[in-house]
Image: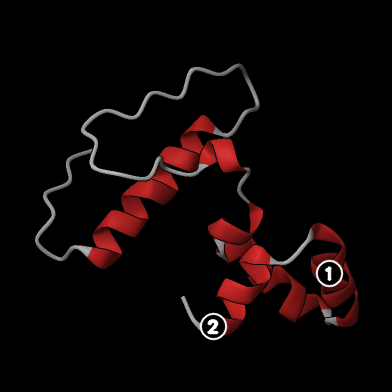
Amino acid sequence: MNAVLRWLEEAPPSARQRIADALDDAERAEFDFHWALNARDAQLPPIGDWRIWLIMAGRGFGKTRAGAEWVRIVAETHSEARIAL
């Protein structure tokens, strides 16, 4: 992730909203493709070396999206990773 996206990821929600309001529709749509900007902390993978990540949550929490985004990140960062769906 580039420095600007890292900064946005750590920026308070009010700063993100001000920036989003200044963008045109195409630029604003780009935000949807950056999961780290939109995910809640509970939807991000835990830090550390782990083998099992359990998300026990109800409907609408975003379990499927969280898992899919994690698989995408693994595929993009670890070319040797073996992934089966």
**In the image, residue 18 lies at what x, y percent?**
89, 72
For this rendering, which residue is in front, 75 or 44?
A: 44
In which quadrant is the C terminus drawn? top left
* Furthest residue toward front: 48
Q: CA distance from mark 1 to mark 2?
A: 16 Å
**Callout 2 amino acid:** Ala
Q: Is residue 6 left or right of residue 10?
A: left
The image's mark for residue 81 is: none
**Callout 1 amino acid:** Ala
- Asked which quadrant contains residue 47, the reply is top left
Local packing at callout 2 (Cα closer than 10 Å; few below 14, some 14-19, many 20+) is few
Q: Is residue 77 left or right of residue 8?
A: left
Q: Is residue 79 left or right of residue 65?
A: left
- Asked which quadrant contains residue 22, the reply is bottom right
**In the image, residue 28 lies at what x, y percent?**
76, 73
Residue in the picture at 32% in, 48% down: 71
Residue in the picture at 26% in, 66% down: 77
What residue sits right under mark 2 in the picture?
Answer: 3
Count of numbered badges drawn on the protein: 2
Secondary structure under the numbered disc 2 in the rendered image = helix
Q: Is 47 placed above or below 57 here? A: below
Residue in the picture at 35% in, 55% down: 72
**In the image, residue 17 lies at what x, y percent?**
86, 66
Q: Is 82 placed above or below 23 here? A: above
Secondary structure under the numbered disc 1 in the rendered image = helix
Identify the mark nearer the N-term, 1 or 2: 2
**Disc 1 + disc 2, Cβ < 8 Å:** no
Residue in the picture at 65% in, 64% down: 10
What residue sits right under mark 1 in the picture?
Answer: 15
**In the image, residue 36 lies at what x, y percent?**
55, 58
- Asked which quadrant contains residue 32, the reply is bottom right
Q: Is 51 placed above or below 27 here? A: above
